[in-house]
Image (spheres, rainbow, N blue to C red):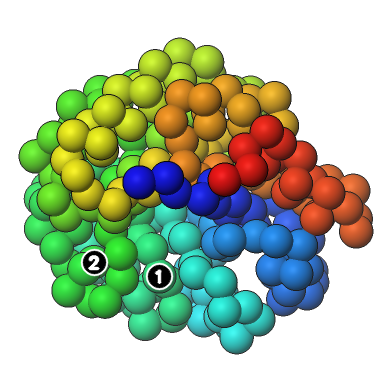
Amino acid sequence: MTRKLLISPSILSADFSDLGKEIEAIDEAGADMIHIDVMDGHYVPNLTIGPMVVKAIRSRTSKPFDVHLMISPVDYLIDPFIKAGADYISIHPDAGPHTHRTLQAIKAGGAKAGIVLNPGTHPDVVDTLIEELDLILVMSVNPGFGGQSFIHSQLNKIRILADKIKSSGRDIILEVDGGVNPDTAQLCIDSGATALVAGSAVFKGQGNYKENILALRKKNTK
């Protein structure tokens, strides 16, 4: 099955002084999902937002909220983020003692479940979890900060995961986050990615969001 390439702009690069209007702008510009990076200052050194902010911006778009939880422990915040409006929740396999149970809890709460692979995480981590997954997120930078350079060694991991998804026969989004720009986007697409997270590449140039999103889609016209 051929899946449309999904673009999920990361609001980490948005103007937080006018976040509601920024979300409306990327919705109008052609975003497919809204990527929300949640950092706890513990699992990663940065600190961002919590469920209250997600709830506050939920009414600004009908597009799915693609929530990446860079927090540990993670289980106690699953339900609050679902209630705040998260459609997808992605967690790191080392963020709690029982990854499979955490994924089940996400799905039981009514959201779709994702797993996140850091640059040093082996792709085989998905093998015993794949029946619970709706999304696999490959980090092409180390998590915690925006604006980092793309780690090209992750392209082989994307190819391996694309093959695993195909073999599973399941409809799983293969998403890439970190250093995504029009050039690296095409490398990810060619390797099998079906969704791209981009922050600065989308939000650069006030009023150019539509052109920036189109540039990420580039040769992919499916």
The residue shown at (10%, 58%) is 101
The quadrant where residue 138 appears? top left
Q: How many numbered dots are placed on residues in this image?
A: 2
Q: Tell me: 196 left or right of 17.
A: left
Structural crowding at the residue carrying mark 2, measured as other residues with C-alpha within 10 Å and reported as few (<14), some (14–19) or many (≥20): many
Q: What type is the residue that disc 1 sits on?
A: Asp
Distance from Cα at disc 2 to Cα at disc 1: 10 Å
Q: Which residue is at the front of the view, 168 or 62?
A: 168
- Name the residue that disc number 2 marks: 106
Work out whether residue 139 can be spotted. no
Whether 76 is drawn above or below 5: the answer is: below
Residue 87, label in figure: 1
What x and y, as percent, mark residue 169?
A: 19, 44
Q: Going by the picture, which residue comes out furthest to the top?
A: 153
Dot 1 falls on a residue whose secondary structure is loop
Q: Nearer the viewer, residue 49 or 66?
A: 66
Q: Is residue 187 left or right of residue 79?
A: right
Q: Is residue 3 left or right of residue 49?
A: left
Q: Which quadrant of the view contains residue 113?
A: bottom left
Residue 161 falls left or right of residue 8: left
The vertical placement of 136 against 134, above or below, is above
Count residues near mark 1 (Cα–Cα under 10 Å), then give few for <14, some for 14-19, many for 20+: many
Q: Quadrant of the C terminus?
A: top right
Q: Amino acid at mark 2?
A: Ile
Q: Position of residue 84 (x, y in %)?
A: 43, 80
- Give percent across and percent down for residue 189: 53, 31
Is residue 130 placed above or below 24 in the rendered structure? above
Determine the secondary structure under disc 2: helix
Q: Quadrant of residue 58?
A: bottom right
Residue 169 visible to the viewer: yes
Q: Nearer the viewer, residue 43 or 4?
A: 4
